[in-house]
Image: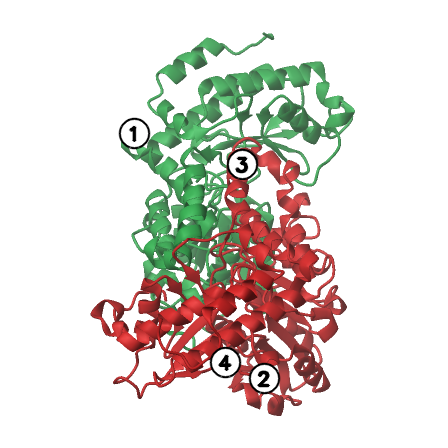
Chain colours: A green, B red
Amino acid sequence: MTDSITCVTRNDCVQLDAQDALAPLRHQFSLPDSVIYLDGNSLGVLPKTAAARAAQVVTEEWGVGLIRSWNTAGWIALPQRIGNKIARLVGAGEGELVVADSTSVNLFKVLSAALRIIQTDANQRKVILSERSNFPTDLYIAESLAQQHGMTLKLVDADEITAHLNDKLAVLMLTQVNYRTGRVHDMAVLTAAAHQAGALTVWDLAHSAGALPVDLIGSGADFAVGCGYKYLNGGPGAPAFVWAHPRHAERFWQPLAGWLGHAAPFEFTSDYRPAPGINRYLCGTPPVISLAVLECGLDSVLAAEPLGGMPALRAKSLALTALFIELVEARCAGHGLTLATPRASEQRGSQVSFARDTGVDGGEGGYAIMQALIARGVIGDFRAPDILRFGFTPLYLRFVDVWDAVEHLVQVMQTSEWKQARFQVRSSVT
Amino acid sequence: MTDSITCVTRNDCVQLDAQDALAPLRHQFSLPDSVIYLDGNSLGVLPKTAAARAAQVVTEEWGVGLIRSWNTAGWIALPQRIGNKIARLVGAGEGELVVADSTSVNLFKVLSAALRIIQTDANQRKVILSERSNFPTDLYIAESLAQQHGMTLKLVDADEITAHLNDKLAVLMLTQVNYRTGRVHDMAVLTAAAHQAGALTVWDLAHSAGALPVDLIGSGADFAVGCGYKYLNGGPGAPAFVWAHPRHAERFWQPLAGWLGHAAPFEFTSDYRPAPGINRYLCGTPPVISLAVLECGLDSVLAAEPLGGMPALRAKSLALTALFIELVEARCAGHGLTLATPRASEQRGSQVSFARDTGVDGGEGGYAIMQALIARGVIGDFRAPDILRFGFTPLYLRFVDVWDAVEHLVQVMQTSEWKQARFQVRSSVT
């Protein structure tokens, strides 16, 4: 036990877990004994049901059912069936959301659609606005589309966004929760302001869906995309999702006009006729095995519904992250870790990031510190150039995990074990 | 036993199987006892290794390795590792081909790139040429891109293609083997002719890869895409593949500028810098479980290499389809089934299609005939409005399967059991 200036003890954390009504949800997951997993915001953990479901799809549905399983096992309806489950988590209605492709590809679809809707007005709106530190794939896709449309992708800091909502703006494209800092944008306020300025909004829910309550319909958002493999526990590279507000349902454009988004794909007609509503956002044949496993992840989140659902998960998430901030700031003071996540709970997603000051210990150490933690079984991740990122998934994390993770961090910092050469070597994925 | 005017007997088929050097390859697959599967051109069968591989990815790599498996289990390199295996089957070089997204999405990428390459010449080339009966998703994607580029998608019959290779042509986009008829285009001849006319070529290998020898480099093709779940046995909705000729490697455009196609994705820079060569055709995070299973399918095809590889598979495939044609024409004469597949072996893919004459038995019966066959365990498929389609995958089909399938077809036709009401009801997927 190391010294501490916080009044929270490990035993307090054990007590918090004992009182936690959501604690039983943890039993849904297969978690390695030696790991404290603070990276569910990058890849969620394995639901215990997933292995059996994968085996069923492979051995029975594919192996025995073969091509017949598109009908008999309901493969053809998986994008909608799973989409409807995600809809319950993000404030969308039945039939408004489908699972398809990747977040990047879906973003291409919805941003293309939003730009085309705006551009039919023969106006002077030539700006796509986003946050400078938005996740790169969002910026790259927007850059590609801006180039094609003769438009400008304007990147600003979070605090500057409202100042740029004007009559030049075509689309405001934001990730609701910043992947680096965990800062949350107010979707309703920014959407209303963008609409007031005559623009449309596209929201990336990669770090929102399953992490905090989202109200797509209530906020009036125009389009949204999101990720299946983070807080939805859908497995590595799980398919993503896409939503359009019903007011756009019959008029939005799908540039990736694949056959499964056709109104009648099995008529095999040579001309494209988009399916009604969101179904046009299907494109090619979906990866069935990955889709089926994603459903297991979703069911693990929906299992919280009888226990209070997303609001209850959000409350626990905020308690976990607040505790982590308190413990790190109290116990790791003087080690060059500066909170990069908003302290105000309403502005904080389900993660906590600390920036590693480059003026301490002779420069950057963030990467090596995270590697030393991972070697101890405390798995977070590092985001260049200086962010140590810790995700807190309330479905399976305990308060005692928070305490133990900080204890490891204290030891890593106090012993300077992160300075060992083996922690300095960069691997391709962090 | 029904009457027959062919001199081939079932025992002859048993003998052919006994002499077949490729026969042991069948043992790689899990095949239902009661099924003769003639739909490997729609969804290949299950390799026995796939279930264990899926379990390993889910339980060990995801469940235990968690986020670390992007490095430790090599997830990040799967698109290239599996791509290199596909390259061996289609005459492409190491590092030239990646697995990504769906065939439809990949077609969007390569057709976008081809159009942009052509359009830099400030020429008058405004035509994308394709075959009228090309697979719909190819036509829909081309229609979408033609619309965006102010171009025309011109659809002609197969025999009219060469007449349209002129100075108006931008891109010739063809599926090498027609999904309905199984007719094979000569890739080298058409590519040379298109180049002679100053155009580029895009080839869809959905019904070629793993079905017949393909020589992308040798034919001089510009771009190619293909499907993982047909002759490559990659599982339902397996990811697709994409290739660009090395001469285009450093200059072609990727509209779907996702982060995994960035030159350095883990630097998380805000501006897009495409990866060298084919790696820029990666986009979002790939569906790892589906990818891993696809590799099992590919390995099942590559297992033929010591036995003669694609040429040997092709020879068996042609023997199977020739036998099927001979037996059906001899034994089902007078039942309104007309061969829709070229009789000349060099023009025939690995399938046989019969058109159901609409003037027989009071109109269309093709759908119901196929349903009656499927009820007997002979699984082919129906392609509206009149095509009964039978795929012959030489990796796992026997000559005796051909004989038995025809015997069932003879019985279905002679007893008119297809007229039963239960076979008339259309399901969504056929």
Mark 2 element type: strand
Q: CA distance from mark 1 to mark 4?
A: 60 Å
Q: Position of residue B330 (x, y in %)?
A: 43, 81
Closer-to-camera residue (A427/A217): A427
User: Residue under circle 2?
Assistant: B127
The answer to which of marks 4 and 3 sits earlier in the sequence is: 3
Mark toward the viewer: 1 or 4: 4
User: Residue under circle 3?
Assistant: B62
- Label 4 in the same subunit as label 3: yes
User: Residue under circle 1?
Assistant: A307
Q: Quadrant of residue A312?
A: top left
Numbered mark located on residue B341 in the image: 4
Up the image or down, B253 lies above or below A164; here it is below
Closer-to-camera residue (A157/B229): B229
Up the image or down, A159 lies above or below A148; here it is above
Closer-to-camera residue (A429/A2): A429
- Label 1 in the same subunit as label 2: no
Question: Badge 4 sits on which subunit?
Answer: B
